[in-house]
Image: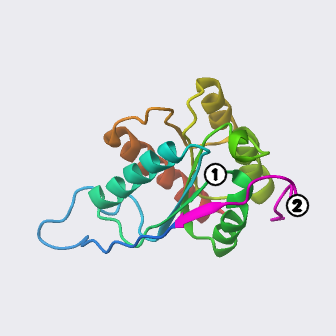
Amino acid sequence: RCRVVNQGETADRKSVPLLTETASPRHGPHENPLAHLIPDNVTVVVVDDSALQRTCVLRSMKNIQKTTAASNWSYAQFETIEAAQPLLCQIHAAKTSAIVCLDEQMGSKGGIMTGTQATRWLLKDLGFSGVIVSTSGDPGAGERHRNLGAHAVWGKPLPPESKQVEDLVAAFKDTMKLRTST
């Protein structure tokens, strides 16, 4: 079920993993009101051919982690979905919480799959149960991602952090319902 498509193709397999862990207190007399709305131990995977956009999304995710006092998040970034597939398969197999942020076009870095194809692969072929966020600058692509099952469409530039948190809280509630109902 989990196979890396287009293996051996000309897709650029470069990846730039970033691993960060932040232990933040979630308990105590001054508990953060956003605590527990977003889970601990989340892997954030950002797939975009633009290094600037990956940096913006990662910075935003790190701010959300800090704002919600979530702990033990790890971060990885990739230029193409093909480069991200092995990690996404690992996350799926381990049944860990994840947020995947996808661009639409990644051909400039050798990517073969589009964000639309990646969303379809994640949800239909892999049965991925994490949160998928479209971060494409193309509104039509964002709608296609949502129609396939993406939880949020943020576009470029990214929306305010409060909107991102709201979307992620709703998405995690959704994915937790699915996990407990199966």
The residue under label 1 is which amino acid type?
Answer: Glu
Residue at horizontal 40 percent and vertical 43 percent from the top? 164
Residue at horizontal 68 percent and vertical 37 percent from the top? 105
Q: For the residue labelled by badge 1, is the local secondary structure a helix, a strand or a loop?
A: loop
* Residue matched to label 1: 79
Q: Is residue 166 left or right of residue 95?
A: left
Give how far apart the Cα atoms at labels 2 and 1 are: 17 Å
Q: Which residue is at the front of the view, 102 or 182?
A: 102
Q: Which residue is at the front of the view, 24 or 173?
A: 24
Q: Residue furthest left?
A: 29
Magenta residues, start to end: 1-17
Residue at horizontal 86 percent and vertical 60 percent from the top? 7
Q: Is residue 110 left or right of residue 157?
A: right
The residue under label 2 is which amino acid type?
Answer: Gly
* Residue matched to label 2: 8
Residue 49 locus on image (x, y percent) = 62, 45
Q: Which quarter of the rendering shows the N terminus?
A: bottom right
Residue 20 locus on image (x, y percent) = 42, 70
Q: Crowdedness of circle 1 by 10 Å Cα count: few (<14), some, many (20+)?
A: many
